Amino acid sequence: MSETRETRRAASLPRQLAWTAGAVLIIAALVFPVYWMAVLAFDDSRSILADTPVFWPRQPSLDNFTHAWDLVAGNILISTIVALSVTVITLVIAVPASYYLAQFRFRWTAVIMLGLLVAQMIPGIALGLSFYTMFAQAHLLNSYVGLILADTTYGIPFAVVLLRAFMESVPADTLAAARIDGSGEWRVFIRIAVPLATPGIITAALFAFLFAWGDFLFAVTLNGTGAVQPVTVGLYKFVGTYGSDWGGIMASVVLAIIPASVFLILAQRWLTVGVRTGGMTG
Amino acid sequence: MSTATEVVTRRSAESTGRAPRRPVARRRLVSAAFVAPLVVFLLVFFAYPLGLGIAMSLQDFDVAALVRGFGDFVGLANYVDVLKSPVTQAAVVRTVIFTVLSVVFSVGIGLAIALYFNRRFPLSRFLRALILLPWLLPTIASGTLFKIMFADDGLVNKVLATLGIIQQPVPWLTDPTAAMAALILVNIWAGISFPAVAFYTGLQDIPRDLYNAAAVDGAGRWRVFRSITFPLLRPVTMIVLVYGIIYTLKVFDIVYVMTGGGPADGTQLLSTWAYTESFTNYSFGGGAAVSNILLAFSLVAASFYIWLQRRSARV
């Protein structure tokens, strides 16, 4: 019976290939804007000004990248520093907290989980305006510390919710056995819980990094005088200053999306986990 | 999605996962250290700013107040002022239209993509991964990319002209109506990934046996969709819709980079208008009032979301 079912469900090879062709078209339409961006970035700017649309680089060149790199290299360094710091802080706070919320009896767990869910839904501008006032008082405007702290608000609620799901699957018996062996709470946490939750920790780290890297709102709000301008702000300024240099702008966009692209290629598995859990847990 | 297993593990953790004999107070203290930083973080970077936002919206909060840290209490005057302003009124309407159209189309397209990919064919895994791309890109990068596509002499106008659809270039970014259309299109694009992935997961969770039974009964494709797929996807659909609303209400970057809320405040959403009130008009009290109005929309949607989740968890 099960065999007939299988044969009925499995489509013939030509049919399957037809489905592949359709899927290629759908995905091509979806990612076309990104492809077109690459065309402009790798093309000599002059052919862009032609009246008929250009769909492939006519005069491939890296000149746009030379110009873009000169202008946004500093911003990329700043983004890297900020995003790495945010990732570290996010993990330091979220990993132990998620372990505790998953494995310990705590009166406030339900309240905190609800708070974390709502925290992810608050419009950034509502926080940004208050951060501006708070940081003006604390002399944290135009500073790395200020931007890093603000950017952790993207990653931490997400990371705790995600990691708690992983921490819940750590068998309580294993933890109890380690405690009976005399291990302290921190040792149990580091030796048993952290290794078992590693896939979740990787996902949380990737997203904390991507969220911080992509932040524009806090960067533009909290850095009015422009001491700490990440790549998103650099890109915005580039458009404002050299609005007609499309090739250069697109080359900067390519530079700005490097982390997202690298993660998509190398860490797809973990990103999918994140997208699914990020929206669906609570 | 795995609610049942979660409940089981949590219960077993509660019954057996307690630390062994040791002074209770000390044990509590050690374990509280796991969660204390998170609690402090939530209080300082979420609870306090939200409270401060309410306080600022009730004060005459100008630049001088910013230096002092507080302004004169004016009651609800900021709310009255911003609600009387035609820009705010238009921004409310625009935010609603922007959100509804973005969500309806991105969820609809996401569902269509998920249904298409809900079968086996060569390369499906690789192609499915690419669906994530619009969602992963920094929104400022997508906004910049589309700003150039929608420029007067940009690709969109060139293609439309080549196809003979338009004679004159459409002023995509300088006419308020055309600009809103462009912004909505870009936001739909940026919003497809999440519903597509969520629906795909939902479809994979539907037991194969149901489809087999329907095939045995000789049910047609449409019948199968209406009687099996659609009803079983309903909980996911509700959650995706509400999540989409919440996500779209937050949108700021795309509008800021593509139109800056202009021309003449013609594309201001509540989020960008709150920013403009604060940093262009230097009315931080008014900006806070606008952002609290936006926050109220988000919180209504959030409550609905939580209610939906509770309900689906109970079933």
Image: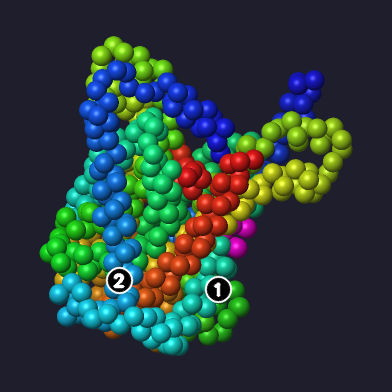
Residue A139 x/y as whole percent: 12, 64
Q: What residue lies at 40% left-to-right and 36% top-to-bottom?
A: A164
In the picture, residue A184 is in which quadrant?
top left
**Front position among marks 2 and 1:** 2
Assign a secondary structure to mark 2. Answer: helix
The mark found on residue B55 in the picture is 2
Left or right, B180 with respect to A201, comes to: right
In the shown orientation, is residue B85 left or right of residue B163?
Answer: left
The number of discs equals 2
Q: Residue at x 63, y 48 (%)?
A: B235
Q: Earlier in the sequence, mark 2 or mark 1?
A: 2
| Residue B263 at least partly seen | no
Query: What chain does mark 1 sit on?
Result: B
Q: Is residue B264 left or right of residue B211?
A: left
Q: Tag on residue B97? A: 1
Residue B58 relative to residue B161: left or right: left
Residue type (three-letter) at the residue carrying disc 1: Ile
Figure quadrant of residue B252: bottom left
* Relative height, residue B59 to residue A193 (above, below): below
A58 vs A244, nearest the viewer: A244
The chain carrying label 2 is B
Query: Dot 1: few (<14), some (14–19), or many (≥20) neighbours within 10 Å?
Result: some
Residue A269 marker:
none
> For the magenta stretch, what is the residue range?
B104-108
Q: Residue furthest top?
A: A181
The magenta stretch spans residue A84: no
Marks 2 and 1 sit apart, C-alpha to C-alpha, by 30 Å
Name the residue rendered at 51%, 63% in the picture: B300
